[in-house]
Amino acid sequence: MSNALTKAAASRNRAAEPYSLFSALRGGGPVVWLSCLIMGLGNILGGQIVLGLIYLAIEVGIIRFLVSAGGGIYWISMLPSLGWREQEKVFNEETFVYEYVAGDQSQLILLYGIASLCVVGLLVLVWQSSVRSGYKALCLKKEGKHVPNFRQSLKSLLDENVHKLLMFPPTACLAVFTVLPLLYMMSMAFTNYSKEGDHLVLFDWVGLDNFIAIFDSTSTIGKQFGSVLTWTLIWAFFATFLNFFLGTIVAMIINRKSIRFKGLWRGCLSMTIAVPQFVSLMVVRSMLQPEGIINRMLLNAGLISERLPFLTDATWARVLVIIVNLWVGIPYTIMQVTGILQNIPAEQYEAATIDGANVFQIFFNITLPYMLFVLTPYIITQFTGNINNFNVIYLLTRGEPMGVGNSAGDTDLLITWLYKLSVDQQKYNLAAVIGIFTFVVLSIVSLITYRSSGSYKDEEGFK
């Protein structure tokens, strides 16, 4: 019985996709099989000459790029070794001067090699599209049906195939500006590309050595990683949920009917959004210095006997960045929550009041569930953004005071530590490992949290 159901399901799938690659290779015949080598042949023989020539031109162009001198195949062949020829100093007997002969550059080999592999992947995708398109054209011609010409195919991009036209630019940009750099960065994590040992020109594959070093709690870099990771999670939790709950409370207070000048209060609280964070955070940093205006005012008022260590003590600095982040982030929450509060049905509040519910019962049974249902994606985004909140930490404390080792401070997040490792210390391999770890953890946590929320499971079921 199960076999029959499986066969029936497979039959329905084949019927739903009559021009699939599997169908083309299985029943396309010699012409389709030959088009696997000569892309566009099926389209040309099926009457789509222009489209077939475009497929053929793409194939010729990519193959020419791959097989040309210094082309894709060369860079791919260099990937296993990442180069070995060092720069040489050779004496020219004709000119009686020393000349430098350039050697290999592992960075370029890694970048161009990965890019060449992506071009090979592009060739595979275009090949698949060519075989399917040629098979479809031949089938339509054999059945006596109309085969769309090139102009009609272009016109279809504004009608039934408009999704292909609209999705192509963002997909292409995503592949070039996101996927390719991401693959390059991930590959770097498996090398010894760093300033240590003069590995900035020629470097080698080291396998999982960088990952082992990062997760080794007995090493200096491992202790730094554990300390920074712990603080990053603590920071992200408080920065996200304090912003949410305090912003919600302020928004509810302003939204009360008895409060006058609601627009004025919201406008005043939103001033921190209007001022660029770079300016405001730099001003706050100067104010909190040991010789800054806040310490001077407190000393002159006699409220303190010595300067407070806002930026020099680990505990003070960590509490400080959380408080400053509240000042920066609460206005965003107010703007989000205000719109939701105004859309909660007033009948629910009236019914709860008639039933004798107090303010806290109304909040926890009506307001909060409604807001969590709507704002769960926003909270996940905020949590992710706070883990990668470079501005508040780096512009306010620079990650200081320094903690374990000499590369990470007590207020450094993973993102600011990654910046220091790559830009300041040129330990690109370790920075790449931290980047991969951050990406994987955030992706898993965000997906699991969102798929477990009511916003995803029951998008229209909230009552």
Image (spheres, rainbow, N blue to C red):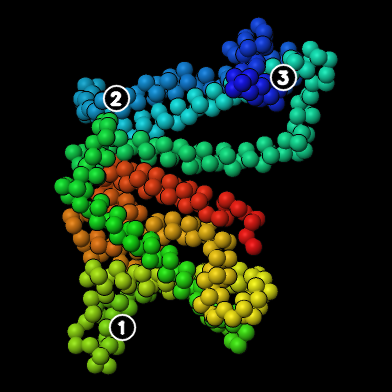
Left or right of residue 186, residue 29 in this image: right
What residue sits right under mark 1 in the picture? 293
Mark identifier at residue 371: none
Q: Which residue is mark 2?
A: 81
Q: Which residue occupies the extreme bottom position in the image?
A: 301
The kind of residue on which mark 3 rests is Lys
Which residue appears at 33% of the width and 37% of the height?
A: 188
Q: With respect to residue 410, does 367 lie above or below?
A: below
Which residue lies under the disc numbered 3?
Answer: 136
Disc 2 secondary structure class: loop
Pick whichever, 354 or 194, lies toward us.
Answer: 354
- Quadrant of residue 214 in the image? top left
Distance between the alpha carbons at the discs numbered 2 and 3 = 44 Å
> How far apart are the alpha carbons under marks 1 and 2?
57 Å
As shown in the figure, which amino acid type bears the numbered disc 1? Answer: Ile
Left or right: 150 as drawn, with respect to 272: right
Label 2 environment density (alpha carbons within 10 Å; few <14, some 14–19, many ≥20): some
